[in-house]
Amino acid sequence: MTDWSQLTHAYGTAEDVPGLLRAAGPDPENPAWNELWSRLCHQGTVYPASYASLPALAEKARESTATDRTMALLLAASIVASTDRPYGIPDPKNSYAAEISELIELAEEALRHPSLADSPDRYVELLEALLAFEGVEVWGEELHGLSGEEFEVPCPACEAENFVVFGEYGYFSTTDSFYMNDAAGRRRELQPAAVSSLEGLAKRLHARALTDGQHKVADALTYLFGSAHCAECDALFRVDHAIVSRWSN
């Protein structure tokens, strides 16, 4: 049994965690989830109690239907993906390998559920969670930009901040943060990757999205792994490379 009184989270002793876990239901708007998130993964920082909660989150996900386990999976994934952990705490991928293996299976099942057909944003969230459980760096934390239809990246040549936009407002790069306005600044058309050129993770994610019927996500992935011109200096750069570079620094 876990002695929660001996563990800490963002606000002190973790004695309140078991009660919050019991209170957290399938509704993402359940206040208990917000309380758990702020305690166990506060602005991306995790604590001893965060890792101790992984078995309980895996159990909660296991006992829920594929459509009701989303919040348990997302919180667990954020904890696992965090690199802002207490000094001396071992990597959870080693100390909680069994739980993470189960979380991978539960995320896979949720991703295949037909209820996600009309929920591309939730699909991307769960896909990012799966990558986090698998230990995929960068994309286990950054894939959600697909849902926002925007990535903000520095130009590798001149370091100007570029918004790479794909979706409702068009498909372009710009340095104007008010790009949604008609009078926005200069735009450069994006160059999506050809499907035949995708390799490695990009190929895997694109093929999976198509198999899962997520055609909007599959299309967005070609822009994520495609190229953009800097709207400031015209340099051509790979969008995913710029994201990885920023994350690494």
Image: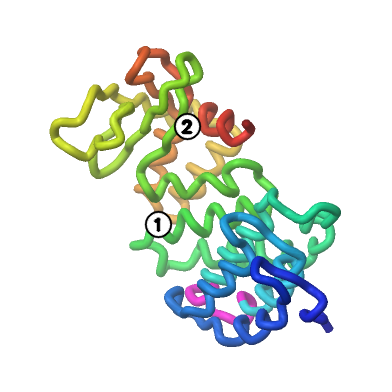
Front in this rendered view, residue 202 or 163: 163
Residue corresponding to mark 1: 121
Q: Quadrant of residue 114?
A: bottom left
Q: Quick check: 246 left or right of 164? A: right
Looking at the rendered structure, the kind of residue marked 2 is Phe
Q: Earlier in the sequence, mark 1 or mark 2?
A: 1
Q: How far from the left and from the top, in percent, is residue 155?
A: 45, 21
Q: Residue at x 69, y 51 (%)?
A: 84
Q: Residue at x 35, y 48 (%)?
A: 216
Q: Quick check: 48 left or right of 29? A: right
Q: Quadrant of the N terminus?
A: bottom right
Q: How far from the left and from the top, in percent, is residue 205?
A: 52, 44
Q: Quadrant of residue 177?
A: top left
Looking at the rendered structure, the kind of residue marked 1 is Asp
Indicate whether residue 65 is drawn in magenta. yes
Q: Looking at the rendered structure, which numbered label has been put on residue 24?
A: none
Q: Quick check: 168 left or right of 194? A: left
| Callout 1: SS | helix
Where does the magenta region start and end? 61-69
Q: Residue at x 66, y 74 (%)?
A: 57
Residue corresponding to mark 2: 225
Label 2 CA crowd tier, 10 Å (few <14, some 14–19, many 20+): many
